Amino acid sequence: MKAQPRAPLALAAAAFACGIVLSTYWPISTALWGWAAASLVLCTIIAVTVKSLRPAQISAVLALVCAGAFARIATPSPQLAAVPPEFLNVKDVEIVGHVTNDGALLAGGGPRERFDLQTETIEIDDHMLVLPIGIRATVFSRDAAEETQDDNAPVIPHMAYGARIRLLAKLRLPRNFRNPGAFDYKGYLEGLGISALASAKSSNIEVLPGASGSRLGFWRSSVRNSILRHIHQSGLWSKEDAAIFAAMIIGDDSLLLRDVREEFQQTGVYHLLVVSGMNVALLAFAIFWLARRLRLPEWPASLLTVTLSVFYAYIAGMGVPIMRAVLMLSLFLVARLLYRDRSGLNATGFAALVVLVLSPAALYEPGFQLTFLALLAITGISLPILERTSTPCRSALKHLDTTGYDLGLEPKLAQFRLDLRLVAGRLQQFIGEHAARIIVTRAIGISLGFFDLLLISAVTQAVLVLPMRAYFHRAAILGVPANILVLPLAGLMLNAGVAAIALSYVSLPFAKLTSVIAAGSLHWILGSLHFLSQFHVSQWRVPNLTVFLMLVACAGIFVAFFTVRKQRALAFAGLAALFLSGGIVAVYHPVPQLEGGKLEVTAIDVGQGDSLLVVSPQGQTMLIDAGGSIGPVRSEFDFGEDVVAPYLWSRGLHHLDVVALTHAHGDHIGGLLRIVEDFHPSELWVGINPQTIPLQHLYKIANENHVAIHQHVAGDEIDWSGTRIRVLSPPADWQPKPQPKNDDSLALLIGYGDTRALLAGDLEKKMERFVATESPRAELLKVAHHGSATSTTPELLAAVQPHFAVISAGYQNSFGHPRKVVLDRLQIYHVKTYRTDLQGAVTFLLDGKHVEPRVQPQ
């Protein structure tokens, strides 16, 4: 068997990455790392001079480790200009600036456009700030209170790159939800150079004379916007298909609906929905193949391929994944032209090394890890296996009618060719010699291609289980069948889509003919993914990754990587170890992080909404509400999936025993649907609510997931896992209004030993007075209605006499919650008050005698 080519650049990248990691956990000064790297480089030079190869190799590797550590520490973190406090959270701040990133209409919620700008001046009253500050602006066509669900309402004028604008807006700082496991939205924006967020009405925006920006930026914006117009407005595809092609081809995912994204995520083929290295590879292959079919020599064909790939990457955004793909593509083609051994693993290492040298922090980015683990799976594990399995068989298909070709092959391959000729000989009696040979070779070729696809998909999914669980809490168990169904048509779909867009500039009839091919391929892909997403296993979600699981996954990857080039038995043992470790990481559930023997009540930070996690002394779990958006404005953001679930996963939870809904307002019910789907509770507790569409949808999802629905009213008493629960509202004869009201709330008094917690939902004065007559004394009070003046009456406080209270409210929310009058009442009654808007998630542990509050370190 042909020896595997060495991959020194892959080793160099691994050593450099080890240095970056080492510097994170070993605090040594920058100068010391630098001197160590320089000294080791000198040792390497000396060793090479005296022809001492092994010491030279060791010194070089250690030098790269020290260089990686030095690069990480020495690379300065970007310092963004901050907006002074006097300009924040006040209306009608006048901003003059220029657009740095083209505006994009957002899916759902009526006409909204998001764009980035850099300020020239910021002014309010007599204060003016002259400083370039990155701002992400969202412009609405109407006031939020006037938003309707009419997607055909007049759209906002497109904000193009370089345009100078003046707008009156409200500025605020980006803020993360302060729960363990929460997404670092603030850090994400800082990486894009964004310091603040702005919201404004379209009537308060004015385009000014002049422009600001680079010539290259204007050219890119013009080309990109032209392509988007041809995608959306030329009639090539339906509105839904155009949104998907815009995301796949040009990287504009602003109009993608969440359910489309999630079908791609659930089935493990999300890489097709975004512009990634695979897109570049598929397009580059088509360009090079076409150029060679047109009989272009290799140099012009390769140069054309690289040039068009760089052009495509720049127009699509030239993000880090695309830059890596272009680097690898260029290296591969240059190596091909120079007739040198083309090691895919070496090309991967080269791209990784360049990216890490330019940005050492990229090592910790999910996109970097996903890309290079996928490339490692393909070039480092899959290809060596294929080289000893399907590749020799494929080479044996060449010149099947030439018996002399058999002499240069291994005996088993020569026998394989003899068997194929015998089969072809039988067939030629019916269809002729030429047709028989074509059918036999094509059938075997297709079978080998299917084997290649199956192996590469399986290995890649096994390797990617580690980052998929770490960042997305998914195992993508259906990734292998999804890739087999989808990938054969992915290249046709993508290239036909690009061809249709290009032809639309020349001949619309021909463009529409090509677009039919692209749309047909897309519909096959969507249909396949929709079919697979119906299987329960597609919704398999897993809690946070533990150190044990990380070690198991890494062990499987390393064993497979270092054994696939060994003897056949050892290679297949390594492959089995990879699949075993991947399976463990995909399905293993760690022990949840709970304190036994105590009743826990945790108020989760969901902004302006409610969500409480209650854990019984015996370890059963109940989630009361799951946050949600307020008002009629629709959003693709899901509080259940994006805020509450990450916190539950960070605690190691994968199942809930009970989910409870206090009442059907959006900021309580909005996130519950995804919680039911992700955590499959046994029971759903509700009070008496009007039968609104969101409530009916919740019931439908509950029934589909075999969740028992129980209605509770005042007077019910429940023994739940070592606790006593009394339902204090709503009354059994409660008559709800046609629309949800705060007084519909299901109020629970949960007791353990001599300690109790009153969870009051959004009760207002009328119902609080009713509850106050039910002897609701409790050490802990969940303050009703986010601290609104409509609630927390003196009568209730006198009846409850709490020692502690917790208020769930949004940071600097527009309602002014919690109200000062409520905070004053709590202070008068000597209640120690905690707030999610200031302290994030707050936990209270009731041991039967005392209450212990805990605030998450920030």
Image (cartoon, rainbow, N blue to C red):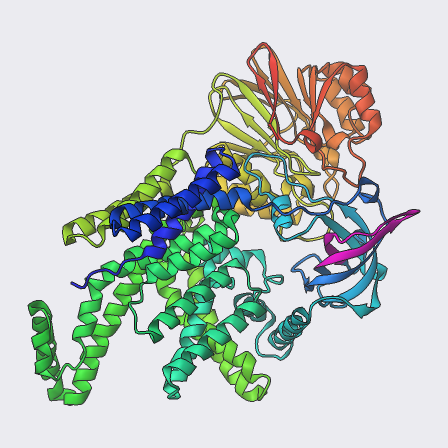
Task: Say which residue appears at 41% left-offset and 54% top-offset.
Answer: 372
Q: Residue 613, can we see it?
A: yes
Q: Nearer the viewer, residue 641 or 166?
A: 166
Q: Quadrant of the C terminus?
A: top right
Residue 163 horizontal side relative to residue 593, left or right: right
Percent position of residue 686, x then y: 61, 35
Find residue 226 and report its image quarter.
Answer: bottom right
The reply to whether the magenta stretch includes residue 133 is yes
Q: Residue 695, can we see it?
A: no
The reply to whether the magenta stretch includes residue 584 is no
Find residue 768 and report its image quarter.
Answer: top right
Q: Quadrant of the N terminus?
A: bottom left
Answer above or below: position of 750 versus 219. Answer: above
Q: Nearer the viewer, residue 281 or 305?
A: 305
Percent position of residue 724, x then y: 56, 18
Percent position of residue 303, x then y: 44, 78
Residue 220 horizontal side relative to residue 281, left or right: right
Magenta stretch in the rendered image: 115-139
Q: Nearer the viewer, residue 88 or 802?
A: 88
Secondary structure character of the magenta stretch overall: strand
